[in-house]
Amino acid sequence: DWWRENRSLFVVAEILFALLFLGWALYRAHQNDLVGTEKPMELAFLSATQRSAGFPPNDPWMSGFAISYYYMGYIMSSALATLSEVSSTFGFNLTVASQFALTGLTTFGVLYNLARSRSQSASRMAAMATGIVGILMMLLMGNFQFILLELPLASRSAPQSYFEFWGTQKLPDFDVIEYQRQAESPLNLDTTSWKHWWWFNASRVPTDYDLNGRLTGIQPIGEFPAFSFILSDNHPHVLSLPFAITAIGLMLNLVLWRREASAGQLLLYGVAVGGLAFLNAWDAPAFLLGLVGAEALRRLMTSEEGRLTTWDWLALPKFGVMLALVAGVAYLPYFVGFRSQAGGVLPNLLHPSLFQRFFIMFGPLFVILSAYLLVEIWRGRAESQLNWRLGFKVGVSVLLGMLALMMLLSVTIAIGNPGTPITGNLAGAQGLSGEVLGQLAQRRLEYGLTSILLALGIGIVVARLFPDKDSAARSGEVAFNGISYSSATGFILLLIGMGLSLTLFCEFFYLKDNFYVRINTVFKLYYQAWMLWSIAAAYALYSVLIYRGRPSPNVILRVAIGILFLVSIFAGLLYGIAATRHRAWIESGRQVASERHRYSPPGDWENAIRQVHDGEAVARGAILYSRVSLADATEPDLLRAQAGGIAVFDGFDILIQEPLTLDGAAGLMDFNDQQVIYCLDELVGQTDAVVAEAVGQAYNVAFGRVGTLAGIPIVLGWENHERQWRGASYHEIAGSRAGDLKELYTRHEMSEIKHILERYRISHIMYGSTERQQYGSLGEDKFLDSLPIVCEAGESRIFHVDAAE
């Protein structure tokens, strides 16, 4: 029966999930920090969602309002943390490990089914191997930044012209102000001597230059899954990853189903699309169109004519609208309250992608999929089914059509809204003069290779998907007998085409946001393209190297392609391996911890007594050695630990090793501030509370602390993030909060700030290290004279406002 036939798959899948989860949990136990990048924001959302009694959850950084962001991932994460009875600082790292495992497992499932669908005789072991290769490519494989730039740079083994060829433009970006090549320099594989956070550069490969060839102020982001998990942020694009791959699985289901989708299937697909919007709004349009594309492929593959009829073309928009309606109705309560900074589409006049940078960004996938498309061209020719005429028309039409739309949109904005930064800041005082337009045209020609190759790829995909039924008659062969490629091949071509379209869109357009540049558009669409292409590339290995159907390349060609594939994958995996080791072992300080926390008694202590046991957990200040018995010892007779951890004996020496833990709370912020926040969290429980604390720069965990650690709403947290989340409504909502907080902390009389306390219904006031640094200590006297202290640690205090009334 079905279970007997598939139980080995279930066993393998469960083992894979366990290994992936435990493996990445071990990584996060070595590197559990929650300080860098946007982790404080993500922790704040997790803490607030875990604390909120209802939904939408309270915004931890804007009291009186709900979260205005894609928060479904935080609901799921906080629910699991609550069920596990762990804090948000612990649940954060458990979420990272679970997302890593879920992403790997969904990738495995899609690829296993793709391989098995190729033919009834497809080997289970080969299909499982394909899925495992896909896991490696999705989770651990990086781009070519490491192999082509970081390694030669750290080794000083290449001339400066080499880096300029790859488009780095300014070597100071790589921390090399006076770069000099060292002749015959060996490769420097010791990453301890490399630039701090060298691995982060792999996420900043897409590069934009002004008309003078200088780097622009705000650069695009080019993350990919391996980087995201090494960094270990819990941002929506990561939280949605396994569910986006599940959407790819639903697309495959639609293609393999062969029949028209039932009402139940439409409901499932619509709910999935809406769920993606709730998880990460960027994914919903892409996979809505992906499902429409899968429906088109299903209709194409069931057509005896090998083409889509007029009825088919009319049915596709209807299919998409039905899915959108289901998604909208299913998640209506979320959409009603959602606000965003997104404000339409703007033309990308100035920043087409330099091909060298694009190649570094997608290197392993670009090589593999280029070879795969060449193989599919050969297969299509062998079957006399390549439709070059249609492919050429579509490729050229897409390229010229996007260029025309970009120009039309530019002219429309220049006439109707000349103050828009995309036109105003670009041309400066000259306006869109002939000189500037000439420079833009020259830039487009110089950097046009990327767009041309992407359009060429789209043309190849179309030529292979839509067979030329007249080619057989023209070549004197048998008459057209339906589409010859498999459903799996058609589906992979669809995924490749989707990735090509997403990346080509970034060459001509971007979505308007607060930055007015393409930073987020490249970030999110490139991320989706990497996801799609990783699955396609893993299947390409199976199709070219393992599958034995006809037509198939000969052994010599297959071996050559196999070597190319393996070299590309290995070059990409080097990044994942090196970055993971560096983060967990070197950056965490564990490599040198054995020497830094080694203790031995002073040489003049002749009969020193060791006071701890091997493997014992010790706290900072614990007694490690005494010169005499403890009963007779005074402080000069004692040697205490300077840091907590696990005591490990090395001869008579004691090594204090930092314990492996998934709780990232240690060292998150000022110790005394952290203690009073814990106290407040326990004090207020689930009751309503609003806390005043200092407001300041973003990306600094010293600001927004109460909301971050406890999820209790504060008056105002990171302003730039709130501005992004709320778009045009931000100023109306935030009002004078920042100024009011400054007044709250600097005024000397309670009567002068009473209106502020009432306006924001402030129940508690935080006065800790950040407040003293930001506003000084003079304003604290009024609180000390008028309000009771409910939590105190060192110089950090929390005052209770209600008790003064």
Image (cartoon, rainbow, N blue to C red):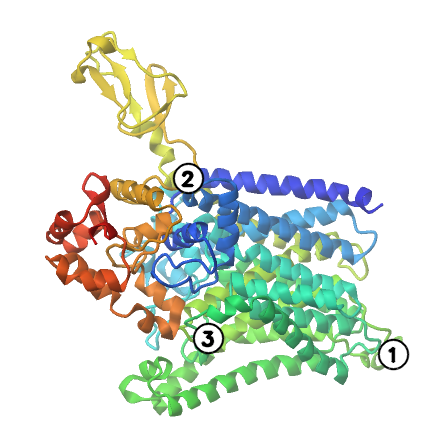
Distance, label 3 to label 1, CA atoms, is 48 Å
Q: Identity of the amino acid at label 2?
A: Asp
Decide: is 415 above or below 625.
Answer: below
Percent across and percent down for residue 698 are 30, 59
Instruction: State which tag comes first along the sequence, 3 or 2.
Output: 3
Left or right: 548 in relation to 20 = right
- Give the SS element for disc 3: strand
Residue 613 percent across, percent down from the top left: 37, 16
Q: Amino acid at mark 3?
A: Tyr
Distance (Cα) linking label 3 and label 2? 39 Å
Furthest toward the right, the residue is 478
Furthest toward the front, the residue is 805
Q: Earlier in the sequence, mark 2 or mark 1?
A: 1
Asked if marks 2 and 1 touch (Cβ < 8 Å), the reply is no
**Residue 370 visible within the image:** no
Disc 1 is placed on an element classified as: loop
Disc sitting over residue 258 in the figure? none
* Residue named by callout 2: 663
Task: Classify 308 as above or below 529.
Answer: below
On the rendered image, what quadrant is the N terminus found in? top right
Which marked residue is nearer to the observer: mark 3 or mark 2? 2
Residue picked out by circle 1: 476
* Residue 642 visible: yes
Q: CA distance from mark 2 to mark 1?
A: 71 Å
Image position of 726 with respect to 536: above or below: below
Nearest the camera: 392 or 313?
313
